[in-house]
């Protein structure tokens, strides 16, 4: 079951997280986070000037909204619908990148690595707190961004 969070220009411009917080806090109160793994989708409606060629992840106001959301819920990638591209889009909101017509999104490699390791450490601790298996989930998350994590890596922390 997909969970959609609709955000609009007004929410973004006012850094209003309530559209997301309402949904996420309800899941937390119901202790239903684990049963909603990879089900979250964002419906972003942000008004751009006619002819503005930017992708939504290139709009500073939208990116700032996602930075604030990530600060509040750093474990959010657990809920994102990876198969529908939500994790890739979320990453684009938080990691510097460029678009290439031939190659698509090109992340800054160092920034992407820092982002990934940050998420690995956060999610590792959070998943353990939830009583959920960590290693396979974290390996899959890394693979989504083109990284392979070796089993020995997990033994270091």
Image (spheres, helix red, strand yellow):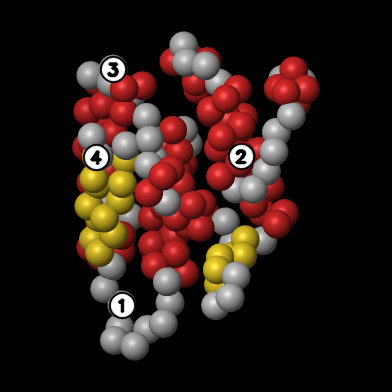
Q: Tell me how far mark 4 sits from mark 3, CA to CA.
A: 16 Å
Q: Secondary structure at mark 2?
A: helix
Q: Tell me how far mark 2 sits from mark 4, CA to CA.
A: 23 Å
The quadrant in which the C terminus is found is top right
Question: Residue under circle 3?
Answer: 31
**Viewer-nearest of labels 1 and 2?**
2
Asked where in the image residue 81 lies, by quadrant, the reply is: top left
- Classify 10 Å Cα crowding around label 3: few (below 14), some (14-19), many (20 and above): few
In this view, 19 is above or below 44: above
**Viewer-nearest of labels 1 and 4?**
4
Residue placed furthest toward the top: 131
- From this viewpoint, is residue 98 visible? no
Question: Residue under circle 1?
Answer: 48
**Of the residues under marks 1 and 3, which one precedes in the sequence?**
3
Q: Secondary structure at mark 1?
A: loop
Q: Tell me how far mark 1 sits from mark 2, CA to CA.
A: 32 Å
| Residue visible at 74% across and 29% down in the picture | 150
**Of the residues under marks 1 and 4, which one precedes in the sequence?**
4
**Of the residues under marks 1 and 2, which one precedes in the sequence?**
1
Q: Secondary structure at mark 3?
A: loop
In this view, 143 is above or below 53: above
| Residue visible at 72% across and 23% down in the picture | 151
* Mark seen at residue 142: 2
Is disc 1 in contact with disc 3, using a CB cutoff of under 8 Å? no
In this view, 64 is above or below 137: below
Asked where in the image residue 60 lies, by quadrant, the reply is: bottom left
């Amino acid at each position: 079951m997909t969970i959609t969070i609709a955000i609009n220009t007004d929410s973004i411009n006012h850094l209003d997280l309530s559209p997301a917080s309402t949904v996420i806090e309800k899941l937390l109160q119901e202790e239903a986070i684990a049963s909603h793994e990879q089900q979250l989708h964002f419906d972003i409606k942000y008004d751009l000037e006619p002819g503005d060629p930017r992708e939504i992840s290139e709009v500073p106001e939208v990116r700032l909204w996602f930075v604030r959301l990530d600060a509040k819920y750093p474990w959010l990638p657990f809920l994102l619908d990876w198969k529908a591209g939500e994790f890739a889009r979320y990453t684009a909101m938080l990691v510097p990148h460029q678009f290439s017509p031939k190659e698509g999104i090109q992340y800054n490699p160092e920034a992407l690595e820092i982002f990934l390791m940050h998420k690995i450490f956060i999610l590792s601790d959070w998943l353990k707190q939830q009583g959920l298996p960590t290693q396979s989930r974290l390996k899959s998350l890394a693979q989504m961004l083109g990284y392979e994590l070796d089993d020995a890596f997990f033994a270091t922390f």
